[in-house]
Amino acid sequence: AQSVAQPEDQVNVAEGNPLTVKCTYSVSGNPYLFWYVQYPNRGLQFLLKYITGDNLVKGSYGFEAEFNKSQTSFHLKKPSALVSDSALYFCAVRPPYNTDKLIFGTGTRLQVFP
Amino acid sequence: GAVVSQHPSRVICKSGTSVKIECRSLDFQATTMFWYRQFPKQSLMLMATSNEGSKATYEQGVEKDKFLINHASLTLSTLTVTSAHPEDSSFYICSARDLQDEGNQPQHFGDGTRLSIL
């Protein structure tokens, strides 16, 4: 079965420190990979995607993610966290054989402390 | 960029009331829209896929008669929660697929509707 795992319910980091939010997936073939951010009582905002090419992709607000095919991972990273980065982050996968659906992870709450 | 407008943002109503939520694509045509439900501290659960001009495709376990979906135009899909009860209280989010922008983003999301049934 296809699935996306975000092993951490919450990640705490001090402002100015680097952050990593983990994501692994189990989907056959070469899926498209995405990261979304959700602020309280809001919908999802697109951060970045990986389809093909360079394994390190850069996205909005200084975020980047590294695709690792052998580990089937797509971890979200940022070199220097901001308090305003505090939000709920979702990793999502679009299977190559189904262009309609997105499979979401369970989400990771990022808390950046001043 | 593509904008999806969802209305209302918040609804509080009595048990037994039917509630309609609208999802509009403001600057693109969306042949496909999606409806999600999000429980507190949980991920998004896909409820149904809404296709313009045809019946919606519901995910397993989602009651079709409870959650009525209509996608009558290329820019509007509606979700009606019929005879809502407290257990239907949740955060409902819609998204729309922009075929012209699929290379960038597969779905554009609305801001969600917080439904509270008393």
Image (spheres, coloured by chain):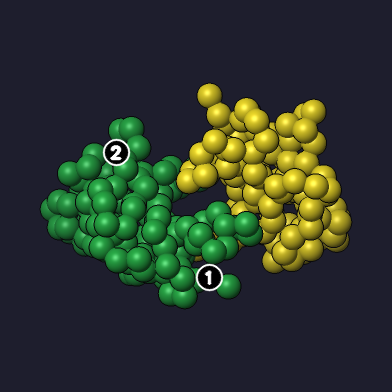
Chain colours: A yellow, B green
Q: Quadrant of the N terminus of chain B?
A: bottom right
Q: Nearer the viewer, mark 1 or mark 2?
A: 1
Residue A32: x, y in percent? Answer: 64, 44
Label 2's element? loop
Label 1's element? loop
Does residue B9 appear anywhere in the picture?
Answer: no
* A80 left or right, relative to B76: right
Quadrant of the image occupied by residue A97: top right
Q: Residue at x 34, y 52 (%)?
A: B50
Q: Which residue is mark 1?
A: B2
Residue B79: x, y in percent? Answer: 28, 57
Residue B20 versus residue A107 in the image, above or below:
below
Residue B46 versus residue A86 in the image, above or below:
above
* A18 left or right, relative to B65: right
Q: Residue at x 73, y 31 (%)?
A: A72
Specify the label residue B53 is tagged with: none
Q: CA distance from mark 1 to mark 2?
A: 28 Å
Q: Nearer the viewer, residue A92 or B70?
A: B70
Label 2 environment density (alpha carbons within 10 Å; few <14, some 14–19, many ≥20): few
Does residue B96 appear anywhere in the picture?
Answer: yes
Residue A109: x, y in percent? Answer: 63, 49
* B69 left or right, relative to A104: left
At label 1, the amino acid type is: Ala
Label 1 environment density (alpha carbons within 10 Å; few <14, some 14–19, many ≥20): some
Q: Are marks 1 and 2 on the same chain?
A: yes
Mark before the other along the chain sequence, 1 or 2: 1
Chain of the residue on which disc 1 is drawn: B
Q: Which residue is mark 2?
A: B62
